[in-house]
Amino acid sequence: MTRLDRPDDLGPGSDELTGVARDLEAYARGTAHAVPPELLPRVLTAVAREAPPTPPVTFARAIAALAPRDAARAFGAMLALVGGQRRGGVGLRLRAAALVVATVLVLGSAAAGATVGGAQLVHGWLVTQQGPSPTATDLVSPTPMPSPHPVTPTPADRSPHPSARPTPSGGPDESAEPSEPAESAQPSEKDGDPSGDPSDDGPGSSGGGAQSPGPSSDD
Amino acid sequence: MPSGPPVRQPVRVTDDELVLAITSGDREAFATLVEREALMVYRVCYRVLGSVSDAEDAAQETFVLAYRALATFRSQGSLAGWLRRIATRQALRQAGRRRPTVHLDPTSPGAPFTAAADPARLLMSAQEAEDVRRAVGGLPEPYRETVVLRYFGELTLEEIAHATGRPLGTVKTHLRRGLARLRDSLPASVAT
């Protein structure tokens, strides 16, 4: 009686599958050939070229093949070898111990680097989430309203302008002050200087052009 | 007194002893393992591939792969089950690579059912065997692996569970579903 003769307990409703199982068993019995005599020498010849499958060799192979599960198992085998639970020569134990130490160092360095990097990331994220501190808000909060100081001319500032030769750049400073159109227009009428014409306003004075005293001087 | 080559006496060694000896560099221990498991490894490969030469290649590759990975063998399962699983995967991989072949000579060593006497029956059996191989090879995983391990590798359900790391109930379910799919895919001349 072979293992194929044992009926499998496949659970309820599996009777209809026994026919298929019998076909597979019949196929298996019909193909029960003996091993070709040349197989054993072939295998031993092929294996003779291989390095002995010691845990350090297997570990290195698993690392090279990027097989973490095999690497973990081989590492466990190396630990057993170093710890004495597994049989092995002194040279083999030394190699295993060296690899264990090297692996621990590499993994430890990687873990430390990952921890530091992770902490920096978390710190950066927390700072971003908290937003600017209240002190910083106070520093930033002043509104961008223009300061009135440069706009409001002092009498000392105003006085030289009417007497001075008006320049295109002087126009807008005065045009920002609606109460001064007469003063700004007078010099241009007196001197006949066409610089009072809004069409001659420089590019920097375009904002004042709309309120420039030009039209009133035309009147 | 006749002098011939020394006859190797079969020594009963456990799986753990064999693995420890081989992973310590003992090549004689590996030869013992090959002698002990070659028959089943070869049969698994032959049943999947249906060719003597292909089965020899797959069996050799199986032992080489097992030799390289022996240090990762877990002693919870049996070494035989572990080897048969490697053989199954290797044979299926090799079957997936090659082109399908038809046995024109049913009396060749590669043809199955050689015990039959009638040539017509031999030819039909060869065709049926090809149908079985093709149907099993067309199963999706994990049903294919389970069916091959059970009927081509002659493992019990418990051994399959050990070898694959799956629960026994899952293995039973996979086998049932695999057989149900085979029932639908096998030709009526085979599925009797």
Image: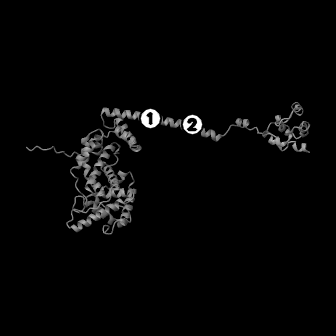
Q: In terms of secondary structure, where does tag 2 sit?
A: helix
Total numbered labels = 2
The local secondary structure at tag 1 comes to helix
| In the rendered image, the vertical position of residue A20 relative to residue A167, given as above or below | below
Closer to the N terminus: mark 1 or mark 2? 1
Residue at 30% across / 36% down in the picture?
A88
How crowded pointer 2 is (Cα within 10 Å; few <14, some 14-19, many 20+) is rated as few
Residue depicted at x 31% and y 64%: B131
The furthest residue to the left: B1
| Residue A55 placement (x, y as % from top left) | 34, 39
Question: On the rendered image, what quadrant is the C terminus of chain B found in?
Answer: bottom left
Instruction: Residue B94: give x, y in percent of width and height.
Output: 33, 53
Which residue type carries mark 2?
Gln
Please state the chain letter of the residue tagged with numbered disc 1 in the rendered image: A
Residue under numbered circle 1:
A106
Horizontal side of A68 relative to A167 (left or right) equals left
Q: Which x, y percent locates residue A187?
A: 90, 36
Quarter residue B109 falls in: bottom left
| Amino acid marked by disc 1 | Val
Residue situated in front as seen by the camera: B97 or A173: A173
Residue annotated with mark 2: A120
Pointer 2 chain: A
Q: In the figure, residue A191 lies in which quadrant? A: top right
Between residue A56 and residue B121, name the one nearer to us.
Answer: B121
Tell me where residue A58 appears, x and y as whole percent.
35, 40
